[in-house]
Amino acid sequence: MAIGAAFASIAVVAGLGIVAWIAYEPALPEIARPSPSSFDRGLVAKGEQLATVGDCIVCHTAPNGAPFAGARALPTPFGILFSNNITPDEKTGIGSWSLAAFSRAMRQGVARDGSHLYPALPYEHFTHVNDGDLAAIYAFLMTRQPVSREAPENQLLPGLGFRPLLAGWKLLFLRQTQFERQANESAEWNRGKYLVDGLAHCGGCHTPRNLAGGEERGREFAGGVAEGWNAPALDETNPSAAIWNVDSLFAYLKTGSDRGHSAAGGPMVPVAEGLSRLNDADVRAIAVYVDSQMHPLRETNLPAVTVVATNDSRSAAAAAHPEADLLFEGACSGCHAPRAPMNINDRPLLSSASDLRADDPRNAVQTLLQGIAPPGGKGAYMPSFSNTMTDRQLADLLAYARARFTDKPAWPDLEAVVGDIRKENAE
Ligand code: HEC
Ligand code: HEC
Ligand code: HEC
């Protein structure tokens, strides 16, 4: 017995030793904050574009807070995380971080002091960013105004606040590979893939995650969830794949709307807002790459094929949903009927709306509950109907719109779904 117990405790100690060995990362030395004038202007400008692709400002700015000063609450299935201050303040920001410390955080998710960072900082993707691009982002951040602001304590489920555990998570899910050019694809396609897989971290939302919060390998772009919305599949299983092409993807990514098919809602809005400030060539490269994922059999970057969906079975839909037909006339058709007075050029034909064609009604429900606020306040706008309609009215309207404008089967239990999503939004 005694010997067995001794062996067991040796095993435990050895096991803990291995964990500590895997988890251990040294602190990197503090540096004096580099003078902003020590950075090349061109490098800073390049870094600004790249930081835009990486949405750094989205996660690292609190509502009404100074840009990059952190303290934005990010809800995750494991609790609430707060982003850090990444302005060059020496005490509360990254002013004393060397480029090596910054690059280690971005690639390996380890802070300057050696502690492990949560993958809410999307280092599963940032790990693929090359040295030159990291140096440019570093130069951009180090030339911002330092702001003194401490992030609040994270509010995680019991036990998950213990950072060394993250070393195990990384062992399972972090693949630190460098981007490899594919010689049989165009330079534009390769640029798009580099941005999408790395800085733009599109898979962070559009790839499904396992129970431990890691992205499921082999199911890249099969569709995921983000902040109460579905992030639709961006591969051939996208329900509207046939309607998307390079041009419409470009317009959607650059302006938040492709005028006629889909408008970015929910967490896709800040993504489009970031991309609206990115140069056209890079946005187009992203569109080319996404298009190739949606249409694996089509040659990359074929001239755009315009597909105009004109499905409109009004009389059948009205017979099945007479009240919704009236509601639609009053509340929706001013913007959504063809040639309606407010249907000025860029209003959608609902017969090609992605949200109405999806298998899951979630995004259509969110669109009605939250409305559409275009990136930067310019462009397509739709009011929220959350306060003006009951769950039953919204469900009836959506059932009607699905029947009238698409050839897809009716969504089940809509009223309950609307009620549940409304409750989630209020939490
Ligand atoms: C999806 C949200 C998200 C995005 C996008 C994001 N970050 Fe973060 N970042 C976080 C969170 C959350 C933390 C804190 C993680 C923790 O506490 O372990 C963090 C931490 C960091 C840290 C470590 C700071 C410290 O003091 O330990 C750095 C550096 C950083 N981010 C830089 C960036 C840069 C640069 C970009 C853009 C290229 C970026 N982040 C984009 C969420 C994000
Ligand atoms: C923070 C999460 C998040 C990130 C990051 C993100 N998306 Fe999205 N995306 C969404 C959500 C949610 C929707 C659904 C929006 C809606 O229905 O209005 C969406 C919708 C889309 C659509 C429309 C799909 C359709 O059929 O309607 C495209 C295309 C798209 N995203 C591309 C991208 C690309 C490319 C990137 C990277 C540059 C990206 N997304 C990054 C969350 C995200
Ligand atoms: C003030 C004008 C306006 C009104 C009123 C309005 N909408 Fe919209 N709606 C829009 C705009 C703009 C879009 C974005 C389309 C785009 O740019 O691609 C949109 C998009 C949609 C979408 C598709 C979203 C997507 O990305 O797939 C649905 C579904 C929708 N509206 C339903 C309705 C219903 C139902 C009503 C009535 C309850 C309504 N709308 C009232 C302007 C309006």
Image (cartoon, grey):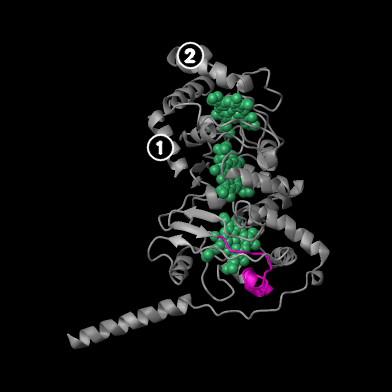
Q: Among all residues in the image, which is located at the extreme left? A: 1
Measuring from the top left, give residue 361's x and y in whole percent. Answer: 47, 33
Residue of label 2: 318
The magenta span reads 83-103
* Residue located at (53% from left, 31% from top): 368
* Residue located at (62% from left, 37% from top): 373
Any magenta on residue 102?
A: yes
* Residue located at (78% from left, 69% from top): 36
353 shown above or below 132: above
Measuring from the top left, give residue 136's x and y in whole percent. Answer: 73, 64
Q: Nearer the viewer, residue 41 or 83?
A: 83
Say whether residue 49 is visible.
Answer: yes
Residue of label 1: 420
Kind of element beneath mark 2 = helix
Measuring from the top left, give residue 407's x and y in whole percent. Answer: 50, 23
Q: Quadrant of the N terminus?
A: bottom left
